Image (cartoon, grey):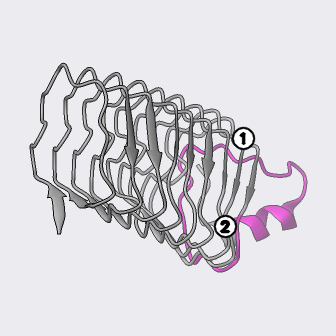
Amino acid sequence: TVSITADAFNERVLLSRVSIPQSVRDIGWRAFSDCSALTQIRIPSGVRRIGWHCFKGCGRLAVAEFEDGVEIIENGVFASCRSLQTVSFPASLKRFPGWAFFGSNNIRRVQLRGSVADIGERAFSGCENLQSMDFPDGLKKIGTDAFYSCISLESADLPDGVEEIENRAFAGARYMTSARIPQSVHSMGESVFSGCRSLERMDIPGSIKGMSLAGAHVPLPANDKKERQRTKRNSGRFL
């Protein structure tokens, strides 16, 4: 198996562009981390795994392209890449890692497709300019703090099939106006929508046994007592 070893090009501050051959199957951890002059990267279809913190701290990285083929991306792969704005991941990807874009505060849109079953913890935490998120149809789980403090995220339209949403998954998304929780969800953690002050609409399924929307400010009908009671039974507690 051909691979790029761990730390292979770590802190090569003059490296601006990389061409990875099709024969490479594995890119090791921190292989290109802190390459401050790197502006673009293309991952060919032959690559199957990208190690943790692989491109972390590449502050000028503006273009990251993936051909279909990569299956595993480990934690923190694009953390602190402050020039990235849009990334589309291939359908071959099976899991979206934790801390993937942590601190990459200029990312605006991310497309996840195909078989991605879970979004790891703090995957987009602190991405304050993230406006649009295309959730994959195969999504089952959203991890703790996955979209914490994504203040520009406008909505969370979760696909049918999602089963679990962990603690504070969307907390601090202060400009989010709507959220859809599908009937498939059976477990929600604490303060999932805490601090979502602009939330105007939320569709909550009866399958959820209990939840807390601390700070969500979800509006309820002012004069409809039956509607209040029904909504409270389905959603747990409103603060």
Q: How many marks?
A: 2
Q: Is residue 210 magenta?
A: yes
Q: In front: 112, or 166?
A: 112
Q: In front: 143, or 68?
A: 68
Measured as percent of width and height from the top left, residue 73 is found at: 32, 58
Q: Is residue 84 above or below residue 24?
A: above
The numbered disc on residue 159 is: 2
Q: Quadrant of residue 160?
A: bottom right
Measured as percent of width and height from the top left, residue 10 is found at: 12, 35
The overriding secondary structure of the stretch rendered in magenta is loop
Secondary structure state at the residue bearing disc 1: loop
Q: What residue is rendered at 66% in x and 67% in y?
A: 159
Q: What residue is rendered at 55% in x and 35% in y?
A: 130
Q: Is residue 56 above or below residue 169?
A: above
Q: In front: 162, or 239?
A: 162
Task: Characterize the local packing of mark 1: few (<14), some (14-19) or many (20 or more) Cα atoms within 10 angstroms.
Answer: some
Q: What residue is rendered at 24% in x and 22% in y?
A: 36
Left or right of 204? Residue 109 is left
Secondary structure state at the residue bearing disc 2: loop
Q: Amino acid at mark 1?
A: Thr
Left or right of 100? Residue 1 is left
Provide the residue designation for mark 1: 177
Left or right of 115? Residue 221 is right
- Does any portion of residue 73 appear in the rendered image? yes
| Distance (Cα) linking label 2 and label 1 | 17 Å
Q: Amino acid at mark 2?
A: Pro
Left or right of 192? Residue 230 is right
Task: Characterize the local packing of mark 2: few (<14), some (14-19) or many (20 or more) Cα atoms within 10 angstroms.
Answer: some
